[in-house]
Amino acid sequence: MRIPAIRVRQWLDEWNSYRFDEASRQRKPLPYFYICSMPASLLRRLSGVRAREATGPRIEDIGIQRGHDTSRSEEIARFVSAGYPWATLNTAQQSRFRELRKPGWLPTAVVGNLVGTTTERRGVTASPSDLVTVEVLDESVVHLVLPEGSEDVGWEPTSGRLVPIEIIDGQHRLFAFPDSQVLNGDFELPVVLFVDLDISWQAYLFWTINITPKRINPSMAYDLYPLLRTVDWLETVEGPMAYRETRAQELTEALWSHPESCWRQRIGMLGRERGKVTQAAFVRSLTLSFVRGWTGSRRTGIGGFFGTERSDQRTDVLPWSRAQQAAYLIELWSGLEGAIRASEEEWAVHLRQVTPRADTPDGHDPAFAGRFAILATDQGVRGFLQVCNDISYTLQHDISFSEWRQPTSAEATNVKEVSIALEELKSHRGISEFIRQLTQDISRFDWRSAVTPGLSEEIENRQSRYRTGSGYKQVRLQLLRHLAGSAGPPISEGAQFVAQSLGYIEV
């Protein structure tokens, strides 16, 4: 099957002097791309969107596409059928207001990349018989020659190898067209196709199409391309903090809103609300811990557990969706709250005795959420998150974190998806046991503030180091020392390694 296409030249002479680096996945691209139209179901088949729904090696290729939001594709499918606003109505309203139906045009181009003979994704190359080849007719017009049999419903690449077209932008539109769907009439999509474009340039294209002109929430890009999070041109112009702060805010909102979170309605989302840790404090704490870059600093080597690799590195980051990340944080905090609630440690008993009921949120333990508990302060939140990140990151190869996979992605604020992730997490023996042990060990730490009534002078002096600005560092330092000295393996070894890396414990 042949599809006519127009070759579009876009290359300025001065671009030849720009830096192109194959080692950073930014080799010099071809000076043109193609524009064509293609039946929606055929494009979906060639781009392998369906194949990426399944679990297995293909879903690990996270550098090409973001996770699929099924609700978004279902919304597009309804729009294609009958336009706006009919597609947004419920079933009863659709029956009543059938006169509102309109054409659901999708005039904007899907952007893709034609895989070449040398294209490799995590050691996998395409079969030559699966490639889309180009037959030149004249200077501007070509034929795109499709793989034999690809026009047939159910076609797949040979032996599960790479598909001939990688989708850079528009995969949710393609998901709206199942391969088995029969459309009465014609529905083609305009398509822009680059040729053998390096993966980092694909990330760059997504950014310029979706983020720069429209100022879309950067967390969408954060989930799409790991390469985008810390590549050099973003560090210079936008900075990786644009992604990290957005992700941290989304995770903070999940902690504040999810029904199973012990921080539900207890975070000051609008500023300093009496008795609440502020949203800004949570965002700052997460950007300094879980949402830091994956590789960390040269001095410590301890990165963010939810972070990512740089474009010039080859490391396998944790392939968790945003819903999984939110579930992990919720479960860590819930584990600590439960361990403290059951604790008979002297410090916990003391806080329950001296904290007035009015100074503790309803249903919570004064030892965890009361007025005199450090865990209910900025310093406590940051210390707990930093140490949990430190230990999780350090023990990444000891605990089966990477085995917990989800085939789709969802926002951290999607209550349904986070709830599903929580159930899966609780049934994952290795991770749930790690959380139980870590939070149990942390619950033995003395979380009393220096202003707790009835403290001895010695304890008051000791706890006073957690006050003011230096208290952030001190909570982390003392908590790591506590775990290194009293926790069981492997947490004690992990804490000792982190403390030594930070210079908190002499080797």
Image (tube, rainbow, N blue to C red):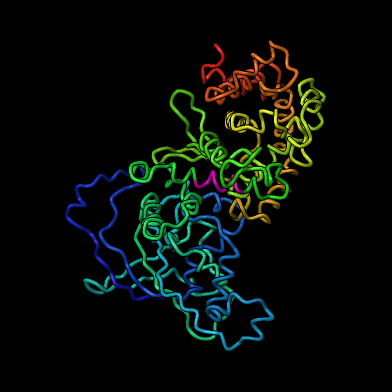
Instruction: Give residue 235's position: percent from left, percent from top.
Output: 37, 41
Q: Which of 27 and 223 is in front in this view?
A: 223
Drawn side of residue 457 relative to residue 152, left or right: right
Determine which quarter of the picture holds residue 363. top right
- Residue 97: within the magenta? no
Residue under the point 64% across and 22% down: 479
Q: Which of 419 and 175 is in front in this view?
A: 419
Determine which quarter of the picture holds residue 23. top left
Q: With respect to residue 372, does 232 lie above or below?
A: below
Q: In which quarter of the image is the N terminus?
A: bottom left
Drawn side of residue 119 relative to residue 502, left or right: left
Q: How many labels does the image show?
A: 0
Instruction: Give residue 309's position: percent from left, percent from top.
Output: 46, 39
Residue under the point 54% across and 46% down: 249
Q: With respect to residue 450, does 164 lie above or below?
A: below
Region rendered in magenta: 246-253
Residue occupying the far bottom of the picture: 99
- Residue 247: within the magenta? yes
Instruction: Give residue 473's position: percent from left, percent from top.
Output: 55, 23
For the stretch drawn in magenta, what is the main secondary structure?
Answer: helix
Q: With respect to residue 41, does 501 lie above or below?
A: above
Residue under the point 70% across and 26% down: 442
Residue under the point 55% across and 85% down: 101
Q: Quadrant of the C terminus?
A: top right
